[in-house]
Amino acid sequence: MGKVVVVTSGKGGVGKTTSTAALGAAVARTGKKVALVDFDVGLRNLDLIMGAERRVVFDLVNVIQGTAKLSQALIRDKRLETLYLLPASQTRDKDALTEEGVAEVIARLRSVFDYVFCDSPAGIERGAQLAMRFADEAVIVTNPEVSSVRDSDRIIGLLDARTMKAEQGEVVQKHVLVTRYDAARASRGEMLSIDDVLEILSTPLLGIIPESQDVLRASNLGAPVTLSEPLNSAAKAYLEAARRLEGEDLPVVVPFERKGFLDRLLGRRAA
Amino acid sequence: MSILDLFKRRTSAPVARERLQLLLAYERQSRGQPDLVSILREEIMAVIAKHVQIDQDYLQVSMDRGATMSTLEIDIQIPNKSAMPLAMAG
């Protein structure tokens, strides 16, 4: 039985899709079978981040409505043979997803894959609730910024109330993943510190992903950053976060500012 | 960060632009109506289904949309006549 992990945040634009791709690829690199499921029906983007946008034939809605088999809709990654993508539909709306349909798809994925990552849409509506509905664990993607932390708190509330596990009296294991962390701004006190975020959310930390242009570059190229540039600082942070997700006890090191001479000269940020 | 990296980093935006242009051209054209590749897929399947019962388990469809050319691959395993209990063409 595979593990179902929802990647969620409430707020949009904090890095859910990027993190789903990076964490999923990181786990798949270790030989585990991984499925990434895009729940953002109508506004899919995981296909684009994974570089599979030209290969989408069928999608999650087709599978739920029975017009395609699950095996036909799954797209195998061209770089990693243990990594698969189930894209969202681009033409339908969120009402095309039914709870029974999602339950069946997740159950079947769980029986075949070691990990099923559900990329949640932004918001707290139906799509986001269905994405988290059958999760065993949750990765809450948070930026060190007030509105993101507030929305994460809201999502944590939903994870504790509206998931199948919660309704059965169990607990969805939750992890906070801080993304777009800018060590320079944090050291100048312009950004919430990691301690602030963790104290407010009182949820364990999965990792800290530094703000990095390599993440943007990976999106541009359509490759998860953990595959395209595994030695980059953001990729390393994702690789370590993935190991923690798999249960390894790795300490989290808060990134610190280390500016090169050229950066100083050009007045560039780590961003 | 090395000097080489500085040069390397410049090159990803054009790739992004190209990928987006290709994708959006397709999505705009297909908004509200199925695209040519999907129509072909359905009609080809219908023709084959007229003669052979298609077992969904032995059917794989893959596609790759390109700027100037797209490929549609339909992989169907058709059982031999002797092993086909529901042969329609006879």
Image (cartoon, grey):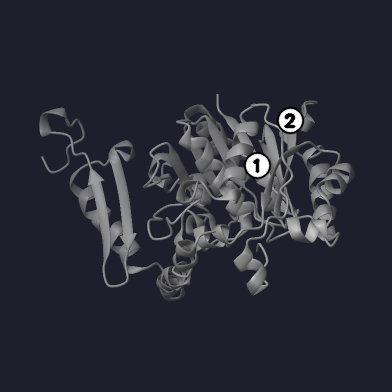
Q: Mark 1 points at which residue?
A: A6
Give the foreground label among 1 and 2.
1
Q: Is residue A241 visible?
A: yes
Question: Share a chain, discs 1 and 2?
Answer: yes
Chain letter for mark 1, please.
A
Camera-side residue of A232 and A221: A232
Q: Label 2: state its secondary structure.
A: helix
Left or right of B43 in this view: A132: right
Q: In which quarter of the image is residue B15?
A: bottom left
Chain holding disc 2: A
Residue A165: mark in rendering? 2
Residue A85 in picture, x, y percent from top left: 47, 46
Place of residue A52 in the rendered image (x, y in percent of width and height, measured from the top left): 42, 55
Say which residue appears at 84% left-offset and 62% top-offset: A190
Give the residue type that dot 2 points to: Lys
Residue A161 vertical placement versus A269 (above, below): above
N-term-proximal mark, 1 vs 2:
1
Q: In percent of the image, x 40 and y 67: which residue is there? A: B34
Mark 2: few/some/many CA within 10 Å (<14, 14-19, 20+): some
